[in-house]
Image: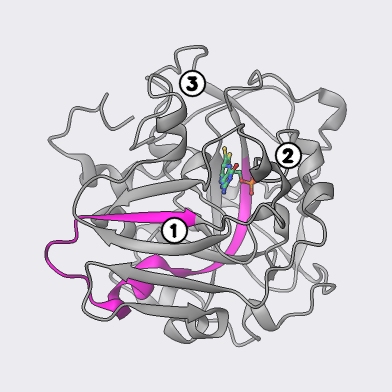
Amino acid sequence: MIFKSPNDIPSSEITPESTYLNRRTFIRTAVMAGSVIASGAIYRGLTQPAPAQLAADQGPAATMLEGPEGESVTTFEDITNYNNFYEFSTDKRGVADKARGFVAEPWTVAVTGLCAKPTTFDLDGLARLATPEDRVYRMRCVERWSMVIPWLGVPLAAVLSAVEPLSSAKYVAFTTLYDPSRMPNQKTSILGWPYVEGLRLDEAMHPLTILSTGLYGRPLLPQNGAPLRLVVPWKYGFKGIKSIVKIELVAGEPPTTWNREAPDEYGFYANVNPKVDHPRWSQASERRIGEFGQRDTLPFNGYAEQVAGLYSGMDLRRSF
Ligand code: MTE
C-alpha cells in the first residue's frame, strides 16, 4: 500500500503456468455472475466437508481450473506467498512465514448491531447457513497487481439475512481480530489497529460478495486471512478484510483503515476504475501475477454488468 511502489514485483518472482489443478470443477465467474439471482442452481453446492473440516494438508488434485473469461487461475504458490497482511508483515513475501502457526480455531464472528437477531457464529454455524460455494474471482490490488483466485465461501447475504437487519441498517462494518500476541505487527503503529472495513448494505447483500473460508478447495491459510475474510471482487483488494471477528450493521458510513491512514489516496468505495488514477500512479493497467507484461484494468474489475447499477446516479469519482 503506501509503503511500497506498485512496481515492486521482480520478474524473477513470477512463474507463468498454464494449468492449475484442484479436486473440483470450478464455475466460470463471468457466466455465473449474471445469473445468480435467477438461478441458485448455477452455483455448485459442494457435497464435500465444510472447509473447517478439511485437513490442512489436503492438497490440490485432479480437476482443471478455469478462471473468468478463460483467464488462467493464479497458482496456489503465488496466492499463498505474495500477500498483504500488515498484522504480520509489510513484506509481501514475508507474510506467510510470519503468519505460520497462527491458530485460527476455535473462532467466532459476532454479527451484531442494527438487527433483530444478533448472533455469534462459529465456523460450523456459518457453514450451516449456506453451503460453501466455489467462486473464481479476479482480485485487483490498488498497487496495480492482480490475481485470479478460486475462493470457497458463503454469500455474505446469507449471513446478514440470518440476523434480520433492521430498516435503519444502511452499512456494514467489519473488524479484524486484535491480538498483538498472535499478530505481532499489531505491536507496532504501522497502521491504526484493528484493521476495519465497510460496505454499503446493498453492496454487502450483492450476490457476488462472499465471506471466504477457503481457496483451492482448502481452508484459508493464515496469510490469506484465516479463517474468514471478505471478498468483494469489483473493489480494490484492500476492501477484503481478513481474519474477521465482528460484522456490525450500522446506520452511517463506517471508518475504513486505508481511508483513515491516507484519505487522499483511498476512498470508502474503492471500486476498481481504470480511469481514475491513484494520486501517485495510473490505474489503467495491471500486472497479473504469473504473467509477463501488463493487461488493461477493467471497470469494476470486469464485473460492471453485475454491479454498475449499484452506483447509478452517483458521482463516479466519489465511487472510486
Ligand atoms: N486485511 C487485514 N486485516 N490486514 C491487511 O493488511 N490487506 C488488504 C486485504 N485485507 C489487509 C487485509 C490488502 S491491501 C490486500 S491487497 C488484500 O488483503 C490481499 O489479500 P491476499 O494477501 O489474500 O492476496
**Residue 31 numbered tag:** 1
Q: Position of residue 170 (x, y in %)?
A: 19, 55
Residue at horizontal 79 percent and vertical 79 percent from the top: 55
Q: Using the rendered image of the protein, determine whether residue 217 is visible from the camera's viewpoint.
A: no
Q: Nearer the viewer, residue 319 or 134?
A: 319
In the picture, the quarter occupied by the N terminus is top right
The colour scheme applied to this rendered structure is one colour
**Residue 252 numbered tag:** none
User: Residue tagged by mark 2?
Assistant: 89
| Residue at mark 3 to residue at mark 2: CA–CA distance | 25 Å
Q: Which residues are magenta?
A: 147-175
Magenta span includes 172: yes
Residue 85's place in the image compared with 314, above or below, is below
The quarter of the picture showing ligand 1: top right
In the picture, the quarter occupied by the C terminus is top left
**Residue 283 numbered tag:** 3
**What kind of element bears circle 3?**
loop
Q: For mark 2, does the 10 Å Cα neighbourhood hold few (<14), some (14 to 19), or many (20 or more) residues? A: many
